[in-house]
């Protein structure tokens, strides 16, 4: 999946599932949109669905540094790349 397609999917999830209004790619999700750890867990489940594979505990822990939509996109691209060789 291209980064552009990922962006469309992630923004749609954030708007539809988490009720974000006009999310910016560099908005701090916690500060601007009230995104919390429970939301992050739910989003990781959506990302796993989108990718079509389960993330390991270590991969999920790597997601804890995510703060923006751009961070989410970088994370997903790195997970896709990591699983291409599996």
Image (cartoon, rainbow, N blue to C red):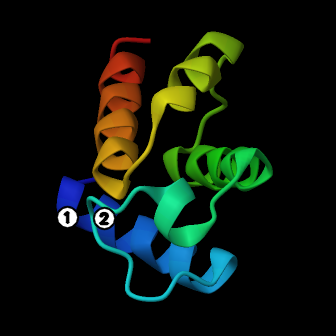
Q: What residue lies at 80% left-to-right and 50% top-to-bottom?
A: 38
Report which quarter residue 19 is drawn in.
bottom right
Q: Give the label on residue 84, or none.
A: none
Give the x, y percent position of residue 66: 46, 38
Q: What residue lies at 33% left-to-right and 60% top-to-bottom?
A: 6
Q: In the rendered view, would you say 65 is above or below 31?
A: above
Q: Secondary structure under badge 2?
A: helix
Give the x, y percent position of residue 57: 70, 15
Give the x, y percent position of residue 8: 33, 73
The residue most toward the right is 38
Q: Give the label on residue 7, or none.
A: 2
Q: Residues within 10 Å of mark 2 (few under 14, many from 20)?
A: some
Q: In the rendered view, would you say 14 is above or below 3?
A: below
Which residue in the protein does label 1 denote?
4
Q: What residue lies at 26% left-to-right and 58% top-to-bottom?
A: 26
The reply to whether the C-beta atoms of the residues labelled 1 and 2 are less than 8 Å apart is yes
Q: Secondary structure under badge 1?
A: helix
Residue 17 or residue 37, whichever sits in front: 37
Q: In the rendered view, would you say 66 is above or below 55?
A: below
Left or right of 73 in this view: 49: right
Give the x, y percent position of residue 47: 56, 49
Gap in angstroms between the C-alphas marked 1 and 2: 5 Å
Q: What residue lies at 34% left-to-right and 22% top-to-bottom?
A: 84
Report which quarter residue 23 is drawn in.
bottom left
């Amino acid at each position: 999946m291209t980064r552009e397609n990922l962006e469309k999917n992630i923004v749609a999830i954030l708007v539809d599932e988490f009720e974000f209004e006009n999310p910016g790619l560099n908005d701090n999700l916690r500060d601007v949109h009230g995104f919390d750890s429970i939301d992050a867990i739910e989003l990781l489940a959506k990302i796993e669905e989108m990718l079509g594979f389960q993330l390991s505990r270590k991969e999920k822990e790597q997601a804890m540094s995510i703060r923006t939509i751009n961070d989410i996109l970088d994370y997903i691209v790195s997970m896709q790349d990591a699983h291409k060789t599996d």
